[in-house]
């Protein structure tokens, strides 16, 4: 296919192209640059999704679920009758693995499969297994077997550190589910957890619904900018990229208009979380959520956010001043900087100052070239390379999904990454990493290889051009691949702590660290080549791109601080104020741009569900990643000895070690709050 692609370009450009140096691309790059054509294979048996034979059709989820539940009953009995020791921990982990292998796979398929029948079957399995897990977390007999182990000093002394850590993590899961409560309160805890599932689903659904208004309520010249449905206009987003400030303002006011039903849903969600936290012995939901993280307590998080705000205040004010000046030059009649202006003007200032346009960069960032760049980087840094494999019939959910084997130069096959990279109808517009199967050491001594999916929304290749990425897309690819390598290299004994199954504020460190590699010209120059001519990306263009990320960086960071502080306040001790009143107060303290009356931005803050009390994680992880980059990789991003140190101290443990101990092992010091804040400030000042 690649040869035909090159021949076509030669014919198109005639003799002129003979004098151009067309880049060579290895099999990995070629697998992503070319269109994928997989003819229907009726001669081979359907392998099932992810090569799981039962999943050759939607009904297979019920079969996989039945088998997992049968295995669960056997393992619960074994765990409850096993003498206290390492075998108890192994039984618990195997129990977790048997359920996760079905639940995690279903959790991905319910959002990604193009066939509604598969999505519906996977959704049903997620609900059923979620209910089973809630019951297991309040199974007194099962918990008692673990409690007996942790109370037996002789048995405990024989446990290796990994086994003891995993046993304690399983006990923590029991405790936050209320296992130590009397029967009535345990039933209450189960009831609250079930209710929270429903409230979370309802809030997430509502947070993405558009708002509507009568067509006549908008000036005629603005109506064509939005979806029109008869006499009403639908607005389903903030239109932050619109050059017309009236379009941005209209979208902001309408999309964020309060919805009484959703406000009540959020109130109930937060109240329910607090009630559950208090029931199981915590001051607030935030205290419960932060146990075991790098931050540990809400007080530490707020100290971090407040100190960062103080350090950024002068820079943030300067950024806002620059944006206001540009707004005035653009002819605005409103001299004040408004919340709907920030995202647009921030990007506009960067583009104007550094003369950067995505269209000039994309030809240098073909997907195949970027994958080769990752392959080169991982090979030099970690001794790991990718090998493209052809999936079996029925193994993938869409023909454009690529499969990579991840191979270590001495250890052999480490696992598999399924790359669902291209945009298609009904596919979520989000970049994310899914664990399908965690790694663990099995009873027969073999290692269960991890399987993950990376999902992006990139433009697919055509018959004329490969998939061309914007700089932002390229950086997101590196970010998500950081998660994937964490999963591949986290060779833990237990599945319960494999790869990214660790504290949220630590899980983002490896992925954000990859963004630093993606911004370093020494790395980028290894692969950024014009897809037609083979010419390298000029260093001046790379420099301008890196500098642009720091322009208005303080204001952009402060916006994230505002979101993180709001998340903490919502999940702290209840206040006799509405969520909108809290929003207005926190926006004034931690942002600086005015609250707009009769809006409720919190209703679009969908991260409140998945990152409840943990939204700060991105900022803290970025601070740690910055420290790791500056101390360990800035001098030489290809340093193999440092790469091995990084794997040994951070990637290898997954969640099997206290997160701050891993950071200390990497940096040879435990960073203070001041160190973390200083790292973020240094990133803004670096030239």
Image (cartoon, rainbow, N blue to C red):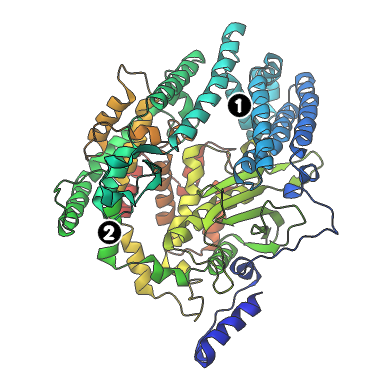
The image shows residue 364 at horizontal and vertical percentages of 46, 72
Residue 492, can we see it?
Answer: no
Instruction: Tell me where residue 95 sits by quadrant.
Output: top right
Distance between the alpha carbons at the discs numbered 2 and 1: 50 Å
Q: Is residue 685 above or below residue 132?
A: below
Quadrant showing the N terminus = bottom right
Instruction: Tell me where residue 368 sits by quadrant.
Output: bottom right
Q: Residue furthest front?
A: 230
> Helix, strand, or loop for circle 2?
helix
Q: Is residue 613 above or below residue 57?
A: above
Quadrant showing the C terminus = bottom left
Of badges 2 and 1, the one in the foreground is 2
> Helix, strand, or loop for circle 1?
helix
Mark 2 and mark 1 lie on one chain; the one further toward the N terminus is 1
Q: Is residue 680 left or right of residue 125?
A: left
Disc 2 crowd rating (10 Å Cα; few below 14, some 14-19, many 20+) is some
The image shows residue 306 at horizontal and vertical percentages of 28, 35
Count of numbered marks: 2
Q: Is residue 178 left or right of residue 139?
A: left
Residue 107, can we see it?
Answer: yes
Instruction: Tell me where residue 2 sits by quadrant.
Output: bottom right
Relative depth, front residue between 669 and 293 = 293
Q: Residue at x 64, y 29 (%)?
A: 127
Q: Residue at x 58, y 49 (%)?
A: 486
Q: Which residue is mark 2?
A: 348
Relative depth, front residue between 203 and 565 = 203
The image shows residue 568 at horizontal and vertical percentages of 37, 29
The image shows residue 517 at horizontal and vertical percentages of 46, 60
Q: Which residue is mark 1?
A: 168
Q: Is residue 461 above or below residue 490?
A: below
């Amino acid at each position: 296919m690649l040869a035909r692609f090159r021949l076509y370009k030669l014919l198109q450009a005639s003799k002129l192209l003979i004098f151009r140096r067309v880049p060579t691309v290895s099999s990995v790059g070629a697998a992503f640059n070319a269109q994928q054509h997989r003819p229907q294979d009726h001669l081979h048996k359907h392998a099932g999704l992810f090569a799981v034979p039962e999943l050759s059709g939607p009904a297979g989820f019920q079969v996989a679920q039945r088998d997992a539940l049968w295995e669960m009953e056997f393992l619960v009995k074994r765990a409850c009758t096993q003498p206290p020791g390492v075998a108890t921990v192994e039984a618990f982990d195997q129990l977790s693995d048997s359920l996760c292998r079905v639940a995690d796979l279903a959790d991905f398929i319910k959002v990604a499969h193009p066939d509604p029948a598969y999505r519906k079957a996977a959704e049903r399995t997620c609900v059923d297994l979620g209910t089973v897990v809630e019951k297991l977390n309040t199974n007194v007999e099962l918990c008692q077997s673990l409690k007996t182990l942790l109370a037996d000093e002789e048995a405990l002394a024989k446990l290796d550190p990994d086994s003891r850590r995993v046993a304690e993590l399983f006990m923590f899961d029991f405790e936050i589910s209320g296992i130590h409560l009397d029967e009535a309160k345990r039933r209450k805890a189960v009831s609250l957890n079930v209710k929270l599932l429903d409230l979370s689903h309802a809030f997430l659904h509502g947070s993405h619904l558009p708002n509507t208004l009568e067509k006549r309520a908008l000036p005629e010249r603005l109506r064509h900018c939005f979806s029109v449905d008869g006499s009403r206009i639908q607005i389903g987003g903030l239109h932050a990229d619109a050059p017309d400030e009236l379009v941005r303002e209209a979208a902001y006011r309408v999309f964020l208009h309060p919805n009484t039903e959703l406000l009540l849903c959020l109130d109930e969600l937060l109240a329910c979380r607090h009630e559950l936290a208090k029931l199981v012995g915590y001051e607030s939901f935030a205290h419960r959520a932060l146990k075991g993280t790098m931050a540990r307590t809400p007080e530490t998080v707020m100290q971090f956010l407040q100190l960062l705000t103080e350090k950024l205040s002068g820079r943030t004010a300067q950024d806002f001043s620059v944006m206001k000046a540009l707004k005035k030059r653009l002819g605005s009649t409103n001299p004040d900087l408004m919340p709907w202006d920030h995202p647009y003007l921030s990007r506009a200032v960067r583009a104007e100052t550094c003369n950067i346009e995505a269209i000039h960069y994309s030809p240098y960032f073909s997907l195949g070239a970027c994958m080769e760049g990752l392959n080169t980087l991982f090979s030099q840094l970690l001794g790991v390379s990718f090998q493209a494999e052809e999936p079996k019939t029925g193994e993938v959910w869409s023909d454009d999904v690529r499969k990579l084997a991840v191979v270590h130069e001495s250890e052999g096959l480490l696992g598999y990454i399924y790359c669902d990279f291209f945009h298609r109808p009904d596919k979520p517009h989000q970049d994310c990493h899914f664990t399908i199967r965690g790694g663990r050491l099995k009873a027969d001594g073999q290692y269960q290889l991890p399987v993950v999916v990376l999902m992006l929304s990139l433009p697919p290749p055509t018959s004329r051009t490969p998939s061309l990425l914007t700089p932002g897309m390229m950086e997101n690819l590196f970010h998500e691949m950081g998660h994937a390598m964490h999963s591949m290299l986290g060779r833990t004994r237990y599945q319960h702590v494999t790869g990214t199954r660790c504290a949220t504020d630590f899980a983002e460190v490896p992925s954000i660290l990859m963004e630093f590699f993606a911004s370093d010209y020494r790395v980028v120059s290894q692969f950024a080549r014009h897809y037609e001519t083979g010419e390298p990306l000029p260093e001046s263009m790379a420099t301008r791109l890196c500098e642009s990320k720091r322009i208005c960086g303080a204001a952009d960071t402060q916006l994230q601080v505002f979101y993180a502080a709001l998340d903490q306040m919502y999940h702290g001790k209840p206040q006799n104020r509405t969520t909108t009143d809290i929003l207005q107060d926190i926006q004034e303290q931690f942002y600086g741009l005015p609250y707009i009356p009769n809006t409720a931005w919190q209703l679009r803050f969908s991260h409140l569900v998945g990152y409840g009390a943990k939204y700060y994680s991105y900022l803290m992880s970025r601070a740690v990643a910055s420290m790791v980059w500056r101390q360990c990789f800035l001098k030489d991003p290809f340093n193999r000895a440092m790469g091995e140190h990084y794997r040994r101290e951070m990637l290898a443990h997954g969640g099997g070690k206290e997160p701050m101990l891993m950071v200390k092992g990497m940096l040879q010091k435990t960073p203070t709050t001041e160190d973390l804040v200083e790292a973020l400030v240094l990133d803004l000042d670096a030239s």
